[in-house]
Amino acid sequence: WHGSPFRCAFCIANKLGFKYRPVDNAMEESEYIAKLKIKEIFFEDMTFGLPRANVEKFCNEIKKRNLKLSWTCFSRVDVADYGLLSLMKEAGCHTVIFAVESGNDMILEKYNKDIDKNKAIAAFKNCRKLGLKTVATFILGLPVVTIQHPMNVSCELIKDCENCFLSNLIPQDLSGKISLLLSNDELRNTLSAAARNSIRKYGWNTITGQNE
């Protein structure tokens, strides 16, 4: 899969056209990967879940052929509904990365994201019910919002060096912090535990209430 059929104003993917491989072709490669005893796959499709019929066929074929593959993918909160997520889980998916971008509906509308925070909430709830792990990606620094901006509802979850690392958009800072986390198991485990504890304190209603 390549490109995107959506219209997000900040993204180049929708300028590339939306192309996808035939399911039989993708299955042929998946079977080859399984024969190599590779157990983990990261599908880098920008929106795993489209076209839906193809993805359903792909997941059903993985199940039918009993390929013991474990995998992660990118998707959208308005594409991966409970039924599709359930099928993905049965086919070996363990983690879904959602491009949420912002917790503020004004920002989402301004940048043509075509979702709202309630759709994001529903998608993450569905994943929790199914036992799927989730990752949310956010854009910090859009013209109308920065991490310090009072309308950035996601900033309430972030405490630099306590439950995450904040990085400046320069290679040296980003690579340095990634290297530090990869080389320091104790620090990585501490930050991971702190992040989970921090997230448990918050619900969207709480966060948005603090920023109204």
Image: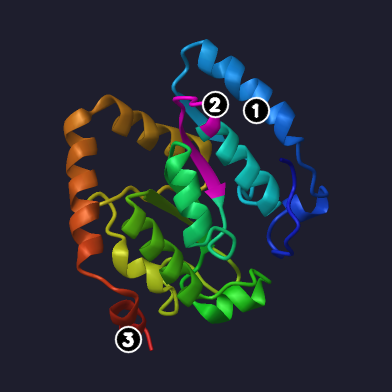
Of 143 and 157, nearer the camera is 157
Q: Amino acid at mark 1?
A: Met
Of 114 and 145, the residue lying toward us: 114
Task: Give the residue number, with chain letter if any, for mark 1.
Answer: 27
Q: Which residue is mark 3?
A: 209
Q: Residue at x 49, y 48 (%)?
A: 87
> Taking 197 as reference, is 180 above or below it?
above
Q: Residues within 10 Å of mark 1 (few under 14, many from 20)?
A: some
Residue displayed at 80% across by 43% down: 19
What segment is highlighted magenta in the picture? 64-74
- Whether tag 1 and tag 3 are in contact, CB under 8 A, the answer is no
- Left of 183 or right of it: where is 49? right
Instruction: Mark 3 and mark 2 in contact? Answer it, CB < 8 Å.
Output: no
Q: Name the disc covering residue 65, or none.
A: 2
Q: Quadrant of the C terminus?
A: bottom left
- The amino acid pointed to by label 2 is Arg
Pick whichever, 69 or 153, lies toward us.
69
Q: Is residue 55 above or below residue 27?
A: below
Residue 116 horizontal/vertical position (percent): 54, 75
Residue 196: numbered disc: none
Q: Secondary structure at mark 3?
A: helix
Is 47 left or right of 1, judged from the image as shown?
left
- Is mark 2 in CB contact (under 8 Å) with mark 1? yes
User: Mark 1 or mark 3, which has the lower sequence index?
Assistant: 1
Q: Position of residue 118 (x, y in %)?
A: 46, 76
Residue 149 lies in quadrant? bottom left
Q: In front of the other: label 3 or label 2? A: 2
Nearest-to-viewer mark from 2 and 1: 2
Looking at this rendering, what residue extends furthest in the top direction?
36
Q: Which badge, 3 or 2, comes first in the chain's sequence?
A: 2
- The answer to whether residue 123 of the structure is visible from this angle is yes
Numbered-mark total: 3
